[in-house]
Image: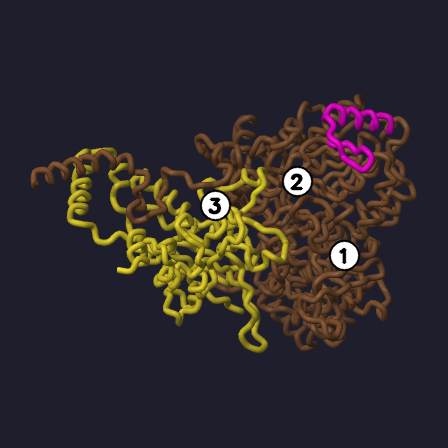
Chain colours: A brown, B yellow
Amino acid sequence: MSTNDQTRRTILAGLGAALVPACRRASWSPPEQDPTARSQVKPYVPGAESYATYEERWVTSSCAQCPAACGIRVRVVEGRAVRIEGNLENPINRGGIGVRGLSGLQALYDPDRVTQPLRRDGERLVPVSWDDALSTLGAALAKLREQAPEQLLVMSGLERGFSHELLARFCRTFGTPNFVDGSPSHTAALARAMELSLGVRDVPAYGAENAGAILSLEAGLFEDACRSTYFARVTASMRRDRSRRARLIHAGPTFDLAAYNADRWLHIKPGTAGALALGLCNALLRDRTYAHELVDRARGLAEFRALAAAYTPERVAAITGCDAALVDELARELWERRPVLVIADERSLAFSNGLDTARVAIALSALLGSIENPLGGLRIAPTTPMRAWEEPALDDVARRGLATARLDGAGREFAGARSVQGTLPDAIVAAPPAIALLHHANPVFARAQPERWRDALAAVPLVVSFSPFVDETVLAVADLVLPDHTYLERLEDATPLPGSLRAVAGVRKPVVTPLHDTRATTEVVLDLAHRLGEPIAGAFPWRTSRDAFEERWLGLHAAARGTIVETSPRAFLDRFYAQGFWADDADAAPVPVELALPTTWSEPRWDGDASRFPLVLVAYHPLGHGDGSGANQPWLRNLQARPGLGAWTIAASISPHDAPPGVHDGDRVRVASPHGSLVLAVHLDPRIARGCVAIPTGGGHAAYGRWARGFGVNVMELLGPAVAPETGASLSCTTRVRMEVVG
Amino acid sequence: MSLVRWFTKLLAPESPEPSPARREFLRASAALTVAAAIPAAAAAATRPHRRRHWGMVIDLDRCSGCNACSVACRQENNIPTYDADPKFAGARPEWMSMLWQEPQREGGLPALLPLPCMHCADPPCTKVCPVGATYKDPDGITMQVWDRCIGCRYCMVACPYSRRSFNWTDPAWSPSEVQMLNPDVATRPRGVVEKCTFCHHRIRKLGEEAALQGREPTDAECQRLPACAAACPASAITFGDLDDPESRVSELARSPRAMRLLEHLGTEPSVYYLEKDRG
């Protein structure tokens, strides 16, 4: 018995020894103590049956879900992208990533993408081959160029980047001045304010890392996706990573994430932040506590003094609704905490006085010594040493076409604008262009009065969309759909929205092989240029768009500085692709600037009769699906548009004092403006300013896939066609509304 | 012994004290391992790893409420998404979510709270599970074995933090969406309770990689290990070993701002919050 026992024990011991190496992978958490230990056994996941080796790699690239262009790393298992993380090395986001960046996989694997080129056959869109589609379009373009090249309209939702520049180059050589760009929340007005004040037409860079305070003038710091990741990082750091805590002061009418995060929230009426800033300027000038060096030699100082002097604390209190005593106290605090980053961004520009407010914000920055101050404040965005493409040669046809007047009135009626979107529907109806190309643009959903856009574009004989998704414009008016890849399938530059003090150039790489029969729009543009023959083909001397891009990236190589320095161009590009970005060695050094001070500021103007429409509408881009371009991604839809609202809810927030009597939280109400009406849920919000209604954008899709369609309402239907007179910016906060109980 | 207790004991994950024979076997295996002079990495791998008490510190003064943690969690853990249909309201599985808390007193300010499972040291949920589907892992993680759950939802009732979700329907992914599922995390069928695992699979993976190199994972490697901590743009979430007094997470948990949720219940959560400082 005992011998048997001994033998058994010996055998077991031997077996154990043999098994030890085999089990070594599983032994960090001993399996006998953990019944889920299955390192050797793969968990059940639908679709994983087709995996053979689970071979895994991480690909560095750049995000394109918003213009911030954060660095990302994508985990790819046997050719499938299964995870997106932030790239720790990239100075734009340093490992952090926002909700939109994280949801990119849902754009790639959207089950309702356009899987191949389509052409319109009556009411339906039917498949067509790439060859047929391109030869149809190529022939139409060639014919149009012979007759009237200016009748080509190209709309791009982008504002920067190589694909955007390729399209602009195409328009120029083709001979059409009608290249209309800009996203719905476009930053052109901010760039114009910088040009008028500091002589540099670009969005400013922000120096917040060492600033003593941030003053937000109705800016959407944490929600408008572009900069939310940046501000999440810098506000955390300015609170906890320094010996002296910096303060975030936010002035705004609604309790959004900026108000939630603020150390001090100044509850003001919508569109009045400029008056507050002028009151602060007045206090600083009066007490002679301002940065003399830049301001004393500024243009328009005397007029600005007179303007500011009119904004006494009492007048500021009357306009903004905040306490008069606060103005002087805040001015002293800001002076003591300088440099201060004063921000007026896209959201601040949505009011009729947006440009004035942005200019006053720059003036306040100057008074606080916070312009081109290496310690913090507003900075001129650094330029990236990218090589320029050779200027294309223009023939007579192109020159004649370019000399014609623009459809949108930019540069004429709108002297300070490069593009005007808001005037286009009427201009198209008056004189329909022959061909319209739409790149990253879905005006039949995302622009004010979508129906007006639909009717206008319906008058264009050939509408071509490059959208990878079946959006409203594709469904309603596109005659030809040439689907682009998604950003995880194509090669392009990732030119970030300026904001970083360090020049950064990112690259987007194909992370997976294209899922469908789609084609990069840059390749399509090259193909069309080559089909059109000389002189257009000569302006596009590249075989593929990769050649065109590499030509420009080699400027970074020639600069011989930054994170990648290599002897040969090939070695530079290899490392550039592998790292996913190039960044300069250091933050840009301050440059000397000349300041021009504003001479006017006007109170916000509202469209509609105040007696019939007593409330003002604040349409805002919610965290997540934003203007609606993220609405096909259910992770974004699942987020609360505002803290306190439920998931999957598009609701009108209103103060309980302003709501119709007897209305309870969650009831259905009708919100009517002079331009339309919507029925939606009401959210009684005790923190919103009296007299206004806030409704998020991005709801009410009629198309755009299963996750977007038929959910919520589209606030764009309430807006009027308001266009800022100077900048041509579309204004989303100028409409008066009323709220009624639904019978 | 009642049938239920017998059944529970049968399935109980925590092994009782090893029997003498088993102890002998383990000792012999260990001795032979050393004698066999297998490569150093394997030797290190067979060494029982250092016990941890995994914990998390969420700094509310850094958190901006951007929700990156909750979306990163959905992505990493194959959490199904249901559409806007009101029938799903309150029934959508969530492991890490942003809790909106109205102020407790007049004039106070509301708070946003990223809310993962608290991984209590003395969890009420594990005690009520009749089948041993949920249990306390020796490293401090409150685990849930999907395959073992019978869907009685006692644990959901017991959890004072409402950090457990029930799958009312089978998750439905289209053939296209199936391709983005994380192959490391099993999906859960209808009728099963699911919850945050502190990204247990990522901890395991890191541990295995370190073990192959003959070392323990370092604190720096652990700080951003769960998907939520990795994504956070504000670096508000720190993960690590609460038993290691040198770790960053222990250091933060000793902060005077540190507090735990519903501490009076005695559940001993492993998730600490650092209070917001309103300047």
Label at residue A572: none
Q: Secondary structure at mark 3?
A: loop
Q: Dot 2: within a 10 Å radius of its alpha carbon, few (fewer than 14), some, or many (20 or more) residues?
A: some
- Name the residue at 54% across, 49% down: B80
Q: Counting residues from the N terminus, which is met first, the one under dot 1 or under dot 2?
A: 2
Q: Position of residue B203 (x, y in %)?
A: 39, 47
Q: Position of residue A280 (x, y in %)?
A: 69, 69
Of A283 and A734, nearer the camera is: A734
The residue carrying mark 2 is A112
Q: What distance separates the C-alpha of mark 1 from that of mark 2? A: 30 Å
Three-letter code for the amino acid on which mark 2 is drawn: Asp
Instruction: Tell me: residue A488, above or below residue A225.
Output: above
- Left or right relative to B87: residue A435: right
Could you tell me if the residues under marks 1 and 2 are in contact, i.e. CB atoms within 8 Å?
no
The residue carrying mark 1 is A732
Q: Dot 3: within a 10 Å radius of its alpha carbon, few (fewer than 14), some, or many (20 or more) residues?
A: many
- Return the chain for callout 3: B
Q: Position of residue A405 (x, y in %)?
A: 89, 40
Task: Report the number of discs.
Answer: 3
Q: Secondary structure at mark 2?
A: loop
Q: Are marks 1 and 2 on the same chain?
A: yes
Instruction: Tell me: residue A506, above or below residue A249.
Output: above
- Left or right relative to B48: residue A374: right
Q: What distance separates the C-alpha of mark 2 from that of mark 3? A: 23 Å
